[in-house]
Image (cartoon, grey):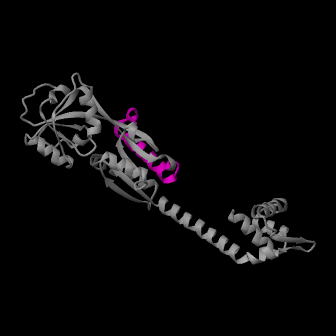
Amino acid sequence: MESKKIKALLAAAETGSLTAAAAQLGYTQAGLTQMMNSIENELGLRMLVRGKNGVRLSDAGQSLLEPMRAFVAAADELERGVERQREENRSAIRIGAYASISRQWLPAILSEFLRENPGVDASISVGSIKQMYESVKREELDCAFVSGHPALLKGLSWYPLHVDELLAVLPPDDLFEGEVFPIKGFSGRDFLMPSLGFDMDIDPLFAAAEPPVTPRTRYTNMDDAALISMVEHGLGLTILSRLILQDGASNIKALPLEPQGFRSLGLVISAKRQSEHILRSFVRSTRATISEMYGDENT
């Protein structure tokens, strides 16, 4: 039962005229008459008595008058509540990101975005790849900056932004002297796996080698600076991305891999929410900022 039909029925009863009710609600008289016939057929009750002098509620309609008024009032309150929620959603955006992206990208992206959307409250959560994919799917986050993995993208829209090179990270006194580090060079060595989820970017590199690379892996759950410090102190090797190492303040060796390794960084948004104005605006600001940083070929 549609609330607009009940609202039209009440208007007809209150004005005593289909013509007056149609004018009040913006319908044609024929359209309103068809609506009244439709609701009577739907309910299986005669709700209006029509006569030369207009219309009035039937006995059945009169007995249902208060429940119909309550139904219309509840429907109106629901619509107002939905609109309030939409307004709240339009005034806030919840963003997930890797620590490196929150450090290197988000200040510039948010500056651009908030210039076009003043008053929007932007919150940032840092997390692992799987956490952020799941948080966007559960709508705990509105969007997230992650590396792209087709197996995790079901129900999400993917906006590629930048191809980020992966680098071998060695202690400063490591005996290796080449300009590129072979993937097979990790075999049998202590390897510090970066924060949770980074194995999804690294393990395929090891598995693709012939024979597959088998380092002595220790899984970590520490921030980038702590992991780099572990490498500096000779506790193992690791693989990090060029974006993570962009600050370049650490005393380490960072070398391209042979064969080269990359991760594709982008933005994920729930597929059913990608048309929302605030998210479309955020995508535009993000693409413009990343394009300015790296050039159009990376976005």
Residue positioned 75% across, 61% down in the render: 42
Relative height, residue 168 to residue 86 (above, below)? above
Percent coordinates x, y for residue 132 in the rendering = 35, 49
The quadrant holding residue 80 is bottom right
In this rendering, would 69 be left or right of 279?
right
Residue positioned 10% across, 37% down in the render: 171
> Quarter holding the C terminus?
top left
Main SS, magenta region, reads: helix
Percent coordinates x, y for residue 77 in the rendering = 59, 70
Question: Any magenta on residue 223?
Answer: no
Question: Any magenta on residue 282?
Answer: yes
In this rendering, would 174 be left or right of 15?
left
> Quarter holding the N terminus?
bottom right
Residue positioned 40% across, 34% down in the render: 296
Q: Residue furthest top?
A: 210
Residue positioned 75% across, 64% down in the render: 43
Relative height, residue 186 to residue 249 (above, below)? above
The quadrant holding residue 20 is bottom right
Percent coordinates x, y for residue 293 in the rendering = 34, 40
Q: Nearer the viewer, residue 87 or 29?
A: 29
Q: Residue furthest right?
A: 52
Q: How many marks?
A: 0
Q: Nearer the viewer, residue 117 or 170?
A: 170
In this rendering, would 287 be left or right of 177?
right
The answer to whether residue 81 is visible is yes
Relative height, residue 238 to residue 128 (above, below)? above
Q: Residue furthest front?
A: 44
Range shown magenta: 273-299
The answer to whether residue 181 is visible is no
Percent coordinates x, y for residue 17 in the rendering = 85, 71
